[in-house]
Image: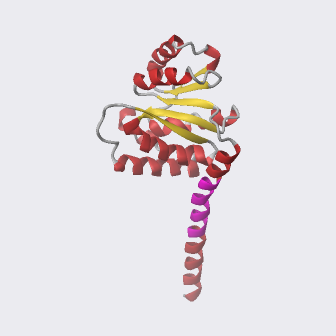
Amino acid sequence: MKSNFAKRRFLFWFTFGLLIVLISFIPVRIAATFRQVPTPQGIFVLGGDYNRTRFAGKFWLSRRDLDIWVSDFPQYLDQHQRILRKFGVLPSQLHLDGAATDTVTNFTTLVDDFVGAGLSHVFLITSDYHMRRARVIATVVFGSRGVVVSPVAVVSGRDEDESLVRVVRDFGRCWLWVVTGRSGASFNPRLD
């Protein structure tokens, strides 16, 4: 009986220690990346509002050497492209991703593309009310791959940020993705 208790105790402390190591590796990677790459190398725009895209176009005008990535539903990508082309963004500098189904998958579908393109630091453009949740997701998803963000908020005119419940839910989904490679997007009722 004592042996069984000792095994459970060992398993608990082993799991607890593993969890602490898993959680702490992201802040260490983020700090190291910020130190190595202090200047953003690209612009990442979260879809869902064309004002974000217009802002990104204006923002890009003072950073013409950077490529722009836009993540949104496939049916909206042509409009994003038209808006950014009006600002002079070249087709070779524009990367449109229509694989995402929600904010978490905006990040999970593109993080490996960023890593593959050698990007370790990107500007993150989204609405001000959406930024807290986007930063939490970026910290876990991008941070797990050594990619960091410099947030740039677009003024939306909304009075309140998104609910803390949504932030916590997506924080959990991000960790699910880090551990299993699945984001839980299949549970999204809008996809039915």
Residue nearest the observer in this picture, 2 or 34: 34
**65 left or right, relative to 163:** right
Q: Nearer the viewer, residue 50 or 35?
A: 35
**Image: magenta residue range:** 16-28
Quick check: can you spot residue 84? yes
Residue 116 on the magenta segment: no
Residue at 63% from the left image edge and 51% from the top image edge: 31
- Residue 137 at x, y percent in the picture: 49, 44
Residue drawn where x is 40% and y is 48% of the image? 167
Q: Is residue 32 left or right of residue 133?
A: right
Residue 168: horizontal and vertical position, in percent? 41, 51
The part of the image, by quadrant, that contains residue 65 is top right
The x and y percentages for residue 115 are 67, 37
Q: Nearer the viewer, residue 123 or 103?
A: 123
Which residue is depicted at the point 50% across and 21% down? 58
Q: Is residue 183 visible?
A: no
18 left or right of 133? right
